[in-house]
Structures are given as structure tokens and as C-alpha cells.
Image: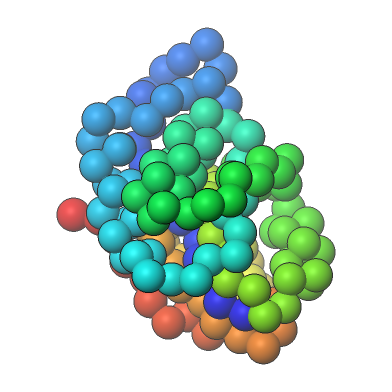
Amino acid sequence: MRLWLLRHGQAEPQAASDAARELTAHGREEVRQAAAQLAGRPLTAILASPYVRAQQTAELVRGALGFAGKVGTVPWLTPDSDPREVLKYLDERAGAEVLLVSHQPLIGALGGLLVHGHRQDPLPMRTASLAELEGDIPAAGLMELLALIHPR
């Protein structure tokens, strides 16, 4: 399985709720840089948090890649979700190439769990950071971090 973890781009500091925060112009540019790293990848799915900034990020990537499928919206990719919930989904997708668009602290904790086998060493995911992981089984400690790319 090849797994891509993408943190949303920079978002406005305030909105009616945290979930309603939208990407800034700088955040959209960060996402375009991340999307360029995914060009030519045979993604089988793009899944995103229901939060506005994650949805906007996923749609920008989808458009940049010309991905024909829809962005899947899932409740287990919100900032405070449990990484083990994500692992349940990934367990059913062995062999796939999946992009997950989410938030901190979840995205860093998930990456750390998959690579190190625990959550005490999360991946340092800044806005629009993209991590590429690979492994036969998407389980704690069994995936290898191939790349961690931060936008300029």
C-alpha cells in the first residue's frame, strides 16, 4: 500500500467555528505545491475531513491531478480523531494508493504510529506538508516513510 498524508493548507485564523475555517490565498498556493508532488500517481481514493479547509484542500488536489473520482468525506479524519479509527479503514485497502487530507494533531500522530509503532514521535506536519508512506500492511510500525515534503 502507498499512503499519502496531507495536512490542509493555511487557513484563516477565525470563523464561526473551527470546522468552518477556509483556506487563505497562501494556503491555496501551498496546496498547489503539494499537489504537484502527486502528479502522475495512480491514486485510488482521496478522503478528507468534513472541515471546510480540508475539503477545499482535497478539491484543489483533485482538480490539479484531474482525479476522476469524488472526494470521500469521512468523520474519522478530524483534528482530534483517534488514529486507530483510520487504521480500521486502511486495513480494508491493502494494495491501494490513498490520499488522506486531515489536520494536526491527527495527521502527525497517524504518521508516527504507522512508521514508529507509537504516537510519541509524530511526524512534523506543517500546513500542506505531504508524507509518503509505503508498506505491505497499513499497521502500527509496519510502514516506511519514503518522503516528507513541506511547502516553501
Residue 126 in view in this figure:
no
Q: Quadrant of the C terminus?
A: bottom left
Which residue lies at the image location 53% right of the left edge and 52% below the top edge? 68
Q: Quadrant of the N terminus?
A: bottom right
Above or below, 84 relative to 16? below
Rendering quarter of residue 46:
bottom right
Nearer to us in this view, 118 or 83: 83
Q: Judge from the rendering whether residue 14 lies leftward or rightward of residue 3; answer left or right.
A: left
Rendering quarter of residue 33:
bottom left
Q: Judge from the rendering whether residue 49 lies leftward or rightward of residue 6; answer left or right.
A: right
Above or below, 117 relative to 6? below
Which residue lies at the image location 43% right of the left edge and 82% below the top edge? 146
Rendering quarter of residue 140:
bottom right
Could you tell me residue 132's position as x and y percent? Answer: 46, 73
Residue lying farthest to the left in this orientation = 152
Residue lying farthest to the top in this orientation = 16
Which residue lies at the image location 48% right of the left edge and 44% below the top edge? 58
Could you tell me residue 107's position as x and y percent? Answer: 55, 56
Residue 14 in view in this figure:
yes
Could you tell me residue 54's position as x and y percent? Answer: 51, 39
Above or below, 49 relative to 119? above
Nearer to us in this view, 93 or 21: 93
Nearer to us in this view, 110 or 23: 23
Which residue lies at the image location 36% right of the left edge and 24% below the top edge? 12
Q: What is the total number of numbered labels drawn onto the structure image?
A: 0
Could you tell me residue 50's position as x and y percent? Answer: 63, 34
What kind of colouring is applied to the model shown? rainbow
Above or below, 90 relative to 34? below
Q: Judge from the rendering whether residue 147 lies leftward or rightward of residue 151; answer left or right.
A: right
